[in-house]
């Protein structure tokens, strides 16, 4: 297991991202973070990245919530830059229950993009 500092609400507290590599594959848990190089570097070539995704990126920018948190675009950009095979959005705010904001992320990330609750049920979104 490896860890990296994630950028969340420094200097008040630190947040960590973790990577677990096994013979069957690799998983990265971003924890609470905004898009940052340390987490992107940790996720390089991972099979799956579970990424905090609070809301649609545009909504977060408008409400001032973009600092310290990933939105749809930030999560997708980190996954794409790291070459992650599958991005799973977790720790989602109530705004992502609507279909429109959720489906903006695949525009920046052309791979399979399940939501956390669908992975837990073992299904995928169409």
Image (cartoon, helix red, strand yellow):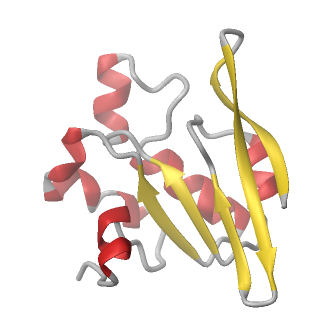
Q: Quadrant of residue 86?
A: bottom right
Q: Residue at x 68, y 60 (%)?
A: 81
Report whether 57 appears left or right of 94: right
Q: Residue at x 27, y 57 (%)?
A: 102
30 over 67 or under it: above or below: below
Quarter containing the C terminus: bottom left
Q: Residue at x 65, y 71 (%)?
A: 84
Seen from the viewer's position, the closer of residues 21 and 95 is 21
Q: Position of residue 88 (x, y in %)?
A: 46, 65
Taking the view exactly as shown, the residue that stands out farthest to the top is 12
Quarter containing the N terminus: bottom right
Report whether 17 appears left or right of 67: right
Taking the view exactly as shown, the residue that stands out farthest to the right is 2
Q: Position of residue 83 (x, y in %)?
A: 70, 71
Seen from the viewer's position, the closer of residues 64 and 26 is 26
Q: Position of residue 4 (x, y in %)?
A: 81, 43
20 over 42 or under it: above or below: below
Q: Residue at x 38, y 58 (%)?
A: 105
102 over 35 or under it: above or below: below
Q: So how many labels did they put on this image?
A: 0
Q: Quadrant of residue 16?
A: top right
Taking the view exactly as shown, the residue that stands out farthest to the left is 98
Report whether 57 appears left or right of 24: left
């Amino acid at each position: 297991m490896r860890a990296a500092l994630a950028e969340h609400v420094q200097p008040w507290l630190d947040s960590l991202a973790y990577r677990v590599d096994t013979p069957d594959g690799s998983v990265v848990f971003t924890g609470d973070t905004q898009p940052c190089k340390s987490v992107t570097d940790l996720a390089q070539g991972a099979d799956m990245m579970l990424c905090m995704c609070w809301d649609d990126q545009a909504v977060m920018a408008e409400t001032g919530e973009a600092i310290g948190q990933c939105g749809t675009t930030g999560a997708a950009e980190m996954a794409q830059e790291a070459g992650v095979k599958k991005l799973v959005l977790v720790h989602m705010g109530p705004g992502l229950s609507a279909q429109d904001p959720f489906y903006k992320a695949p525009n920046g990330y052309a791979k399979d993009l399940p939501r956390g609750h669908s992975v837990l049920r073992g299904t995928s979104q169409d």
